[in-house]
Amino acid sequence: MEATRTTASGADPRLGAARIHVIDVADGRVVFDRDGDLPGPTASVLKLLTSAAALAALGPDHRIATRVVAGAEPGEIVLVGGGDVTLTRLPVGTASFYRASAHLETLADAVLAAIGEGVLDRLVLDDSLFAGDAWLPEWDDEGRSPEGYIPFITALQVDGDRDDPTIDDTPRSEDPVGRAGTAFADLIGRGRDIRISRGRAAPSAEVLAEVFSPPLSELIRFGLETSDNALMESLARLSAIAIGESADFAGVSRAIPALLARYGLPVEVLTVRDGSGLSDRNSVPARFVAELLVQAHRREHGLGVIDDMLPATGPNGTFNRKRFTGDDAIVGDAVRAKTGYINIVCSLGGIVRAADGTELAFAVYAVGEMMGDPARAAIDAFVASLYLDGAEAA
């Protein structure tokens, strides 16, 4: 039998030691497979798993609270981090990188209103919600540093700890908690110095004010669209907390598979090291990703949120404009997918609406040393072949 375009492009040597799995959403038929059952590194395609786990643990309407409570002594308040990395220090009316964020200024105004003419001279910063290390050492293996791609993972921070709250990759600080505290102290100081310290709020402390993140569904939209690492690491830890796991990397590694098991997926094949996909030790079969995407596209188990939030190609989509160019631009607006890249893998997982109307869920990992633009081009060519071949891709 003559090879299809998909068969030929799936054998492209630029894909390295590829893992590929493609499923016809309508009937569950495996349309194409190349080592799809062999676990491999995912890069940011792992964010699909983190999103699904967060939906199971928290629900699509969950909002992350940042609170200020009364301190142990008169004149003292406690700023309690709830894991909302999208909280912004920018003035109300100014959009941060995250868009639609809660504003630290709103929280400060509410605190001042609650206190009235009372004394306020001490601020305690409570970052105790998350546990363990704030940085995964193996991230350094990929050349990732807290200066740009991702901050230290803390439950209290503003703007993902960016130096410039309005752009993606920008230096981060050595102390996200301190940056947030300094910004809040400036807002509540009313021209006076506020003494800042670290500590914990009393469990029964009076809540003076609180602000909330956008709902989880919107956080997932933004996390998939921009591949924001800080946001996904926070959602992973909040998911772990929700099911009684520890709020550290070890807890995340147990919680994500446990939550995904609720969807009937074979989680025993997973190795999860973080929530963002930055670790090169994450290991997930391409089949697992494709099967998760089938459930999302069928809107099973509440996973339709992920299907809705996938970045789309085409002039009105949010997909990377550097992808699906040249001959591959034939896909138009027919692809919705999550990208991924670390040094050893380029990846893509999503849905393609083929030219013949067939809807295909796919996951493609191009695995090798220093995978880059050639691997991305080969992945795009493979998905374009799926678009052209449709039901005849096998």
Image: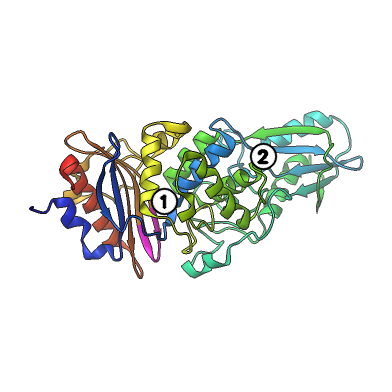
x and y percent of residue 49 in the render?
47, 47
Picture quadrant of residue 37: bottom left
From this view, report whether residue 84 is shown above or below residue 14. Answer: above
Dominant secondary structure, magenta: strand
Q: Amino acid at mark 2?
A: Leu
At a point 43% along the width and 55% down the height, the residue shown is 284
Residue occupying the far right of the picture: 74
Distance from disc 2 to disc 1, alpha carbons, whole Å, reads 31 Å
Disc nearer the start of the sequence (2/1): 1
Please say whether residue 166 is one of the residues in the magenta stretch: no
Q: Residue under label 1, please give it.
A: 45
Q: How many marks?
A: 2
Picture quadrant of residue 303: top left
x and y percent of residue 6 in the render?
18, 51
Q: Which residues are magenta?
A: 340-346
Q: Nearer the viewer, mark 2 or mark 1?
A: 1
Whether residue 308 is visible to the viewer of this picture, yes or no, is yes
Quick one: SS at disc 2?
helix
Whether residue 98 is visible to the viewer of this picture, yes or no, is no
At a point 65% along the width and 54% down the height, the residue shown is 176
Picture quadrant of residue 319: top left
For this view, does 65 lie left or right of residue 274?
right
Q: Amino acid at mark 1?
A: Val
Q: Residue under label 2, please give it.
A: 104
For this view, does 139 lie left or right of residue 43?
right
For this view, does 125 lie left or right of residue 248?
right
Quick one: SS at disc 1?
helix
Q: Residues within 10 Å of mark 1 (few under 14, many from 20)?
A: many
Residue in the foreground of this view, choosing between 260 and 342: 260
Residue in the foreground of this view, choosing between 181 and 329: 329
